[in-house]
Image: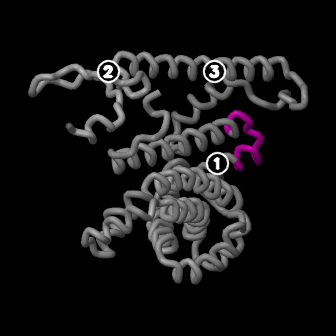
Amino acid sequence: MNIGAESAPHVATPLLPRASRGARFDDSVLPVAARRPPAREKLRASVRAGAIGVVSIAVWLGAWELASRYELEFFFRFENIPAPSEVVLALGELLSTPKFAAHVGNSINRIFLGFSIASVLAVAFGLLIGRFRLVAQSLLPPLEVIRPIPAVAWIPIAILLFASAEQSMVFITFIGAFFPILLSTVHGVESLDRRLVFASLSLGARPLDVFWEVILPGAMPSIVTGLSIGMGTSWFSLVTAEMISGQYGIGYYTWEAYTLQKYPSIVLGMMAIGVLGMGSSFLVRVAGRRLMPWFQPQGASA
């Protein structure tokens, strides 16, 4: 008589269909939330989201056109705000000259240099600060003192530090991107499950291997988030620097249009800043997803 077998509690297990060797797994037995949506449903959801976005933009543009044409005044004064139709006409005239492309090219070069330097240094410092207590105690206090200083306050010091206005604007771009990337990297390292580190060490991994194969991949989602935020703040900082001390760039173009009272050109400059910032942040997120094929954000399958 097997007493252990009779006294063991009965645990109900779900009945799964018996699959032959080499057959594909049928996910119909899984809960609805765990099933992978078919390609047709993904396409339908993407088309629906795109249509909603187009309609939303059209509604905003229509409201802007009416408010400008009829010079409405309710909390805001639209008498001097150009309508979207006027902006489109100004865009056609502007694209026929190389001036606007030169401004955009100068801004993109400054963003590339400042953001690249900030990304390398901020990620390196963030990994070290988050990993080693002595480094955190040495570097964080001075960094926390200068972190709240806005980028516009750095412009006079940047002009004194560097020999050319170009270098000072790259430095301002660097300052704008550095701290969001740094803090996100530190947060990613500190929020990593320490059991992963202890498990890798117990399995014989060297500290350098743990750093590259456990800590860096674990902190990568936070790093990519910081890079995306840093890209936006770097555009904000650069445009501010170009408005004050620049001679070329999209920020200088926008301020020059205001000085010359070319109101449609002001809107064009603002829209160019928004499109360039959105596009560059999108590229950062795409590159981040390519670097993290294992990462599945919450709600991505919804």
Q: In which quarter of the image is the N terminus?
A: top left
Callout 3 amino acid: Ser
User: Could you tell me residue 45's position as x and y percent?
Assistant: 46, 19
Instruction: Using the numbered discs, state the Cα–Cα distance from disc 2 to disc 3 in whole angstroms.
Output: 39 Å
Figure colour scheme: one colour
- Write down the region rendered in magenta: 255-265
- The residue indicated by pointer 1 is 253
103 to 27, vertically: above or below: below
Can you name the residue that lies furthest to the front here? 1
User: Quick one: 58 or 30, which is closer to the camera?
Assistant: 30
Q: In this view, does 239 lie above or below 153?
A: above
Q: Can you identify the residue that label 2 sits on?
A: 29
Q: Residues within 10 Å of mark 3 (few under 14, many from 20)?
A: few
Q: Which of 271 and 36 is in front in this view?
A: 36
Q: Can residue 85 be seen in the rendering of this structure?
A: yes
Circle nearer the viewer, 3 or 1: 3
